[in-house]
């Protein structure tokens, strides 16, 4: 499989220099990431756009600063620990490649690694979430090299790409058909062949995957936990899901874990803000006894699913 060489200068900037015992990720890097490689991957994915040499160089300079900021951010929120595998995935995956508006076919590659992390519209009411929020959620997932992971809400594909560099197999479901079709073409040009996507309603999970999932990450706000998702979680597995009412304040990230005996435990984590889970979630009542998110104060619609971790809840 083809992938890309991690820039050693970027690793130095993020504290991941040789000698720190870098963990192996799912796929090794073999081909340098250059402007020519980026433009070739863009064309192979069927998208528009071309990056100049000056723009490419500016992106790489901002990336070095962003990686250092991601490491500091994670250490501040995980008792001084930033998972080296997560940092390495951020160094490896070219975020600029995922800056694209699929509604109008408009690239925004040159906006990658902005100084103040924020979500970017990718069309159809969805977004490339801010990179600090994605770093937080990736580390919360606690991904391991042998894991099989499901993401509900493919969006830009960046979150799945990150996880695919760490885990054995990455699945992702997108409910918006034109977005799901477009994003499905972007992984192969990067050599990310352990990612499988489909268009569908994430409320039902991906029951055809035999054995279920070690981790399920949801990148849209659910009003309650869909029963199928819990059922498809392996014993010992982890579900990371925003819970809250559509376009309301008071959404929180919840972390569910399934015990070996099938019992499920949960804890309330940080405050977030995501666009709502649509499809069956909007018209199916929760099963009796299922906790449902309380109504909160309304907020303006977001351009897409954008996690905004604030102070820990509780």
Image (cartoon, grey):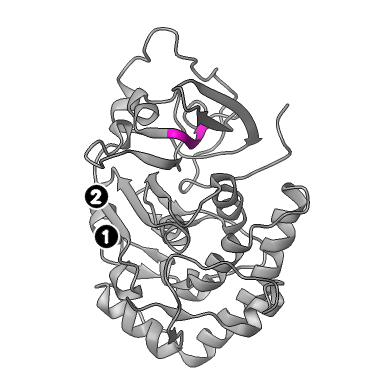
Task: Work out whether mark 2 precedes mark 1 in sequence or the reverse, and give the earlier one.
Answer: 1
> What residue is at 74 percent from the left and 55 percent from the top?
75
- Give the structural element (helix, strand or loop) at label 1: loop
Q: Nearer the viewer, residue 269 or 256?
A: 256
Q: Nearer the viewer, residue 277 or 213?
A: 213
**Is residue 288 visible from the viewing direction of this image?**
yes
Which of the 4 image quarters holds residue 52? bottom left
Residue 73 lies in magenta, yes or no?
no
Disc 2 to disc 1: CB gap under 8 Å: yes
> What residue is at 32 percent from the left and 31 percent from the top?
203
Q: Which mark is residue 198?
A: 2
Bin the neighbour count of mark 1 within 10 Å (Cα to Cα): few under 14, some 14-19, many 20 and up: many
Q: Is residue 149 left or right of residue 16?
A: left
**Is residue 243 visible from the viewing direction of this image?**
no
Q: Nearer the viewer, residue 125 or 269?
A: 269
Q: Position of residue 32 (x, y in %)?
A: 46, 87
Q: Main secondary structure of the magenta part?
A: strand
Which of the 4 image quarters holds residue 181? bottom left
Image quadrant where one finds the N terminus: bottom left
> What residue is at 64 percent from the left and 77 percent from the top?
11
Q: Position of residue 48 (x, y in %)?
A: 30, 76
Q: Position of residue 157 (x, y in %)?
A: 39, 58
Q: Which mark is residue 108?
A: none
**Residue at the limit of the structure toward the top, as seen here:** 288
Up-down: is 226 above or below 61? above
**Residue span colored magenta:** 235-243
Image quadrant where one finds the C terminus: top right
Which residue was labeled with disc 1? 184
The image shows a total of numbered marks equal to 2
Up-down: is 47 above or below 158? below
């Amino acid at each position: 499989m083809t992938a890309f060489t991690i820039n050693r200068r970027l690793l130095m900037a993020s504290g991941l220099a040789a000698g720190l015992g870098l963990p192996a990720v799912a796929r090794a890097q073999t081909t340098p990431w250059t402007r020519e490689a980026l433009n070739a991957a863009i064309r192979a994915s069927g998208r528009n756009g071309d990056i100049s040499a000056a723009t490419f160089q500016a992106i790489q300079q901002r990336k070095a600063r962003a990686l250092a900021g991601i490491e500091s951010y994670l250490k501040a929120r995980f008792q001084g620990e930033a998972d080296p595998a997560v940092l390495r995935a951020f160094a490896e995956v070219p975020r600029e490649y995922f800056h694209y508006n699929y509604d109008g076919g408009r690239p925004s590659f040159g906006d990658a690694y902005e100084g103040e992390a924020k979500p970017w519209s990718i069309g159809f009411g969805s977004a490339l979430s801010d990179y600090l929020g994605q770093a937080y959620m990736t580390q919360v997932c606690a991904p391991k090299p042998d894991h099989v992971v499901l993401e509900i809400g493919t969006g830009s594909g960046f979150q799945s790409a990150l996880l695919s560099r760490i885990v054995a197999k990455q699945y992702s479901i997108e409910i918006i058909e034109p977005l799901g079709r477009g994003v499905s073409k972007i992984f192969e040009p990067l050599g990310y062949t352990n990612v499988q996507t489909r268009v569908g309603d994430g409320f039902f999970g991906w029951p055809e995957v035999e054995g279920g999932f070690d981790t399920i990450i949801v990148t849209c706000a659910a009003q309650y936990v869909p029963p199928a998702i819990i059922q498809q979680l392996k014993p010992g597995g982890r579900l990371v899901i925003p819970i809250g009412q559509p376009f309301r304040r008071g959404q929180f990230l919840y972390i569910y874990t399934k015990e070996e005996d099938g019992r499920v435990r949960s804890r309330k984590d940080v405050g977030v803000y995501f666009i709502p889970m649509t499809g069956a979630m909007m018209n199916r009542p929760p099963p009796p006894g299922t906790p449902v998110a309380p109504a909160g104060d309304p907020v303006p619609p977001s351009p897409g699913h954008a996690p905004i971790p604030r102070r820990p809840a509780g």
